[in-house]
Image: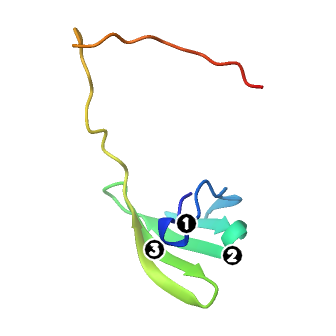
């Protein structure tokens, strides 16, 4: 998870819990935050982010891929792998 306003990037979500029905709870211990929301019919999750003594509404939307390239492409594509050291 990223929180750009706090310059916090790559934060692990330590626990994701689904509650009754469509309720979702995400605990983010690294920043003392909790998100409680509900899965909506349109696949977005609406809820409240709480961190320290503050809370604010938060809506999580499924990203739409901006493109789906189809060949032939005007560039060369190469599959690469790098060993993990």
Residue 58 in percent (x, y) is at 42, 73
Sequence-wise, which precedes: disc 3 or disc 1?
Answer: 1
In the rendered image, which quarter is residue 72 located in? top left
Q: Which residue is mark 2?
A: 32
Q: Which residue is mark 3?
A: 47
Sequence-wise, which precedes: disc 2 or disc 1?
Answer: 1
Q: Which residue is mark 1?
A: 7
Q: Is residue 75 above or below residue 53?
A: above
The residue mark sitting in front, 3 or 1, is 1
Residue 65 in percent (x, y) is at 31, 39
The residue mark sitting in front, 2 or 1, is 1
- Which residue occupies 65% across, 61% down? 17
Report the residue that reaches farthest toward the right.
85
Crowding around mark 3 (Cα neighbors within 10 Å: few <14, some 14 to 19, many 20+) is: some
Crowding around mark 1 (Cα neighbors within 10 Å: few <14, some 14 to 19, many 20+) is: few
Near-viewer residue (14 or 40):
14
Crowding around mark 2 (Cα neighbors within 10 Å: few <14, some 14 to 19, many 20+) is: few
- SS class, disc 2: loop
Q: Are marks 3 and 1 in contact (CB under 8 Å)?
A: no
């Amino acid at each position: 998870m990223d929180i750009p306003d706090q310059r916090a990037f790559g934060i692990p979500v330590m626990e994701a819990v689904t509650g009754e029905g469509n309720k979702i709870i995400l605990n983010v211990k690294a920043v003392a935050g909790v998100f409680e929301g509900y899965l909506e019919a349109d696949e977005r999750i609406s809820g409240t982010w709480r961190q320290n003594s503050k809370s604010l509404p938060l809506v999580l939307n499924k990203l739409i891929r901006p493109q789906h390239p189809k060949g032939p492409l005007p560039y060369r594509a190469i599959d690469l792998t790098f060993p993990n050291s």
